[in-house]
Every structure is written in structure tokens, then in C-alpha cells.
Amino acid sequence: MLGRSLLLAAVLSVPGLASLGQAHAPAASQDSDALIARVDQHYNRLTSLRARYSEHYAGMGLDRTESGTLLLKKPGRMRWSYDEPQGKLFILDGRFAWFYTPGDAQAQRIPAKQLDDLRSPLRFLLGHTQLKKELVNLTVTQDNHGIHIAGIPQGMEQRIHRLTLDVTANGEIQHMKLEELDGAITEFAFTQVAENIPTREQDFVFNLPEGATVVDGPPPV
């Protein structure tokens, strides 16, 4: 949250999990429910969020890592600003998603309701978070690397095999892994997170570069 930007990086070290010996041991139902509730509560209280992201995409003959800054604001706004190439953008303005790479003659636009880009699972953070409703076949497991919440995003069953959120015991998402049915994998890692920060409306407005035209369709891989 949620193109292909975000993150290969984090091996989680969550306090209190050092005693867990079995890899990917299912969490007790009561503990799982409590953890899911903490994630919901953590993001429901947010009005905005800024973080550094690293994204790794492997699939379709590509193996690429990119990074940049993610800005989220409720309701329904998102901005991914890439480090390289500078000026590459993905913006969700509440109505449309926009994707543009400097030097391109076209900017892609798609209605937000039709967005199935791999960033779109993060959109649940922009509303009222309810993981049990957002993810199908929801599971919670723990191992020596942390706590993992996994499932299939609602509406993306024809594309996504599994979404895994690596979270802290306090309910903060640090890493996200999307496994597609065709074998492609996208991972996002988040650092330097700042919550409930001031934002500007113009940060979520896409300004079409001079000479570029708008094309309706999904962003490229």
C-alpha cells in the first residue's frame, strides 16, 4: 500500500519472539485475533503516513530493485515518489491512479475502483482497516524472524496467490510480499516511518507534464 516499487530489505527482529523455536508455527486463535485487532487499530487511528520504501520485483524476465518515498493520506490518497529516475511517480488522488516516468510521452490513468496494481493492497490503510474482511483465507504465523499475516486480497484472487504482511507485536507493518499466480514476486520494505504528519493537497494532484498525453490503462510492470 500498496506499481512495482517497494522493498527487499527487512529481516524482522521483534522483541518477545526469541523463544519461538518452530518456524512458521500457527499462532493461537486468541493471540491471532488480538494481533489482527492491533494492526487494525494502529492504522485506523492514522490520518497520514510517510515512509521510505524499497521495492524488489522479480518476474516476467525482470529482476529490479527501486526505492523512494511513500506518502499516504486519508481518505484514499497515496503518492509514491521514486529516487531513480527522479520524477517517476505513482499517485492515487482518490478518484484515479496515475503513473508517469520522466521522458515518456504518455501518462497512464485508471479509475481507483478498477486498480489492481500491486500497490493497491495498501489502499486498505487509507480507509477503515479490517484485515479479516480485506484478506481471504487469513492466517497468522510466527517464527524467529517475526509475525506474519497472510491471505489473498479481496478482488485480486485471479492475480495474487498470497499477500504476506510482516508486522511487529505492536501491529506495525514493516514488510509486504506479494506472490502472483504466474510466479512473479514483489516485496516492499518500509523504514523511517512518520505517522500523522502534515500533508499538502498538492502532493496528491497529478500535473501532466508539458507535451505528454493521458492514456487510460493499467501501469506497466
Image: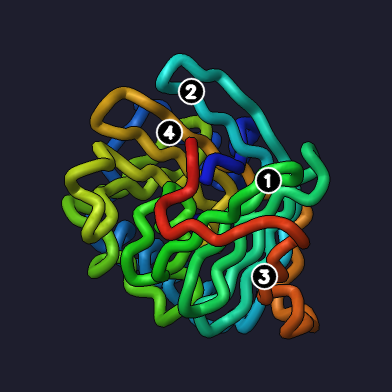
Upstream in sequence: badge 4 or badge 3: 4
Upstream in sequence: badge 1 or badge 2: 2
Amino acid marked by disc 1: Thr
Residue 11 shows up from this direction: no
- From the image, tell me which residue sits under label 4: 143
Residue 112: % across, % down:
41, 70
Distance Cα–Cα, label 4 vs label 2 = 25 Å
**Secondary structure beneath disc 2?**
strand
Label 4, residues with CA under 10 Å away: few <14, some 14-19, many ≥20: some
Label 2, residues with CA under 10 Å away: few <14, some 14-19, many ≥20: some
Amino acid marked by disc 3: Phe
Residue 162: % across, % down:
29, 40
Question: What residue is at 55 percent from the left and 61 percent from the top?
Answer: 214
Upstream in sequence: badge 2 or badge 3: 2
Q: Which circle marks residue 206 in the picture?
A: 3
Question: What residue is at 67 percent from the left and 70 percent from the top?
Answer: 206
Residue 186: % across, % down:
47, 34
Upstream in sequence: badge 3 or badge 1: 1
- From the image, tell me which residue sits under label 1: 101
Amino acid marked by disc 2: Ala
Question: What residue is at 18 percent from the left and 44 percent from the top?
Answer: 158
**Front one among 107 and 114:** 107
Question: What residue is at 27 percent from the left and 26 percent from the top?
Answer: 182
- Measured along the vertical axis of the image, is residue 39 above or below residue 174? below
Amino acid marked by disc 4: Asp
Kindly check if marks 4 and 1 are in contact, taking CB atoms under 8 A apart as contact: no
**Secondary structure beneath disc 4?**
strand
